[in-house]
Image (cartoon, rainbow, N blue to C red):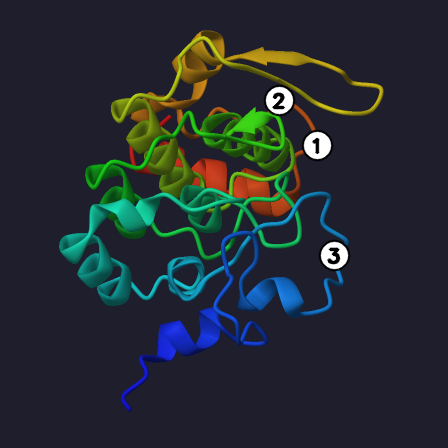
Amino acid sequence: MKVRWEEGLCHYRHPDGNTTTSSWCDTIPDETRREAVWHDSMLALTIRFGLIFYPLAKLSRSPSVLTKPGRPLLQYVLNDVQGKKRWSTRTNPEMLSVLLCHGADPNETFEGFSVWQTALQAFVIHVQFSIFDLERRCSVLRLLVQHGANPNAQVQLDGPDTTRYSSPVFLARFLDHEQCGRCISRGKTRDDQARKAKFKAEGKD
């Protein structure tokens, strides 16, 4: 009998076939001590690592695979597996575009926050310290806005500097391509200054 790989993974340790509330990844010890069950899947894994052809084939056959319990698929593109406040170094705008064009919702919520809010918060934290890879990250936020991200959403940073970031103000500051080199107001390093000089030389500042 032919068994597809994904079906085998989904039914790992579930011989009775009951995978409604659990999947193969839920049986693996969780070193990150997640507060909620993510219900990872083979599709989520390929999205996380940017293997674009597998998700594209699955979505072309059945757009309904976008709907899963637990963590939204968009977050596997945007946020680090270790935590929602960290921007993933693997973030792929092309993968993000595929999901959004097939109907993924940037306002889908998980653990009390939308995909858009977690992306916005991770971006705010990132740009406080470095402008490395900023242009790609700006393009990611633009994609989310273009596909319906709530422009009135807000995020608030933890700790003593509890600044509230409203999307309209934030977007006006960061999403204009010509403004991408003006994001650091404190904590500049020599590398940051060199990158900003490069932006200016290229006419982006």
Label annotation for residue 34: none
Q: Nearer the viewer, mark 3 or mark 2?
A: 3
Q: Is residue 120 above or below residue 36?
A: above
Q: CA distance from mark 3 to mark 2?
A: 32 Å
Q: Residue at x 45, y 8 (%)?
A: 152
The nearer-to-camera label among 3 and 1 is: 3
Q: Quadrant of the N terminus?
A: bottom left
Q: Is the residue 49 above or below the residue 76 in the image?
A: below
- State the residue lying farthest toward the right: 160
Q: Which mark is residue 32?
A: 3
Q: Badge 2 is on which residue?
A: 185
Q: Secondary structure at mark 1?
A: loop
Dot 3 crowding, Cα within 10 Å, few <14, some 14–19, many 20+: few
Q: At 53% from the left edge and 45% from the top edge, which residue is drawn? A: 79
Q: Which residue type carries mark 1? A: Gly
User: Which one is nearer the viewer's eye here, 204 or 32?
Assistant: 32
Q: Which residue is mark 1?
A: 187
| Residue 84: percent from left, percent from top | 61, 41
Q: Toward which corner of the image does residue 138 lie, by quadrant?
A: top left
Residue 127 in picture, x, y percent from top left: 57, 33
